[in-house]
Amino acid sequence: MKIILTALLLMFSINASADATKGQEYYLEYLRPVFGYNGQEFASQYLTVEWKRYFKKDASRFIKKFSKKHPESAAFLASEKFQEIAPDIKDFAMKYAADSGELAACD
C-alpha cells in the first residue's frame, strides 16, 4: 500500500512540476525579443540561489528587476501569461545558472 501511495504521489508531483525545456522555449519566444540576449546569456547572469529568490512570490523580484532593466517588457511581465510560464522560465534559468555547469544550446 505504501509503495502504491508513494508511486502516485511521485507521479502527481512530476506532472505538477515545471519544465526547463519548456522554459527555454518560452524564453526564446516571449522574452528574448525584448531582453535581447540569448538563453545562455540570460540564464548565466545569476547563480541558482539568486534565480530562486527572483522567482519567489509570483516572481515579484524578477518582474521588478527586469521591468526596470527592460521597460518594454513591463506589460508582458505583469500579465497572466507570464505568471503561467514563470515556473518553466525559473526552471530554465536555474538549470543553466552561472553555477550550474551546464550550457544552454539556444540562440
Image: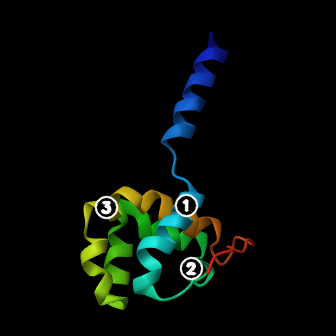
Identify which residue, 95 or 84, lies in the foreground.
84
Identify which residue, 33 or 58, lies in the foreground.
33
| Element assignment for label 2 | loop
| Element assignment for label 1 | helix
| Residue annotated with mark 2 | 46
Instruction: Please report the residue visible at 45 percent of the width from the left and 57 percent of the height from the top.
Output: 87
Where's residue 56, x and y in %? 40, 62
Q: Nearer the viewer, mark 2 or mark 1?
A: 1
Amino acid residing under circle 3? Lys
Amino acid residing under circle 1? Asp
Numbered circle sitting on residue 91: 1
Numbered circle sitting on residue 11: none
Categorize mark 2 by other alpha carbons within 10 Å: few (<14), some (14-19), many (20+): some
Q: Quadrant of residue 45?
A: bottom right
Identify which residue, 14 or 21, lies in the foreground.
21
Where's residue 44, x and y in %? 61, 80
Figure label count = 3
Name the N-terminal-most of marks 3 and 2: 2
Numbered circle sitting on residue 81: 3
Categorize mark 1 by other alpha carbons within 10 Å: few (<14), some (14-19), many (20+): many
Where's residue 95, x and y in %? 63, 65
Distance between the Cα atoms at labels 2 and 1?
A: 13 Å
Name the N-terminal-most of marks 2 and 1: 2
* Quarter placement of the C terminus: bottom right
Amino acid residing under circle 2? Tyr
Name the N-terminal-most of marks 3 and 1: 3
Where's residue 34, x and y in %? 39, 85
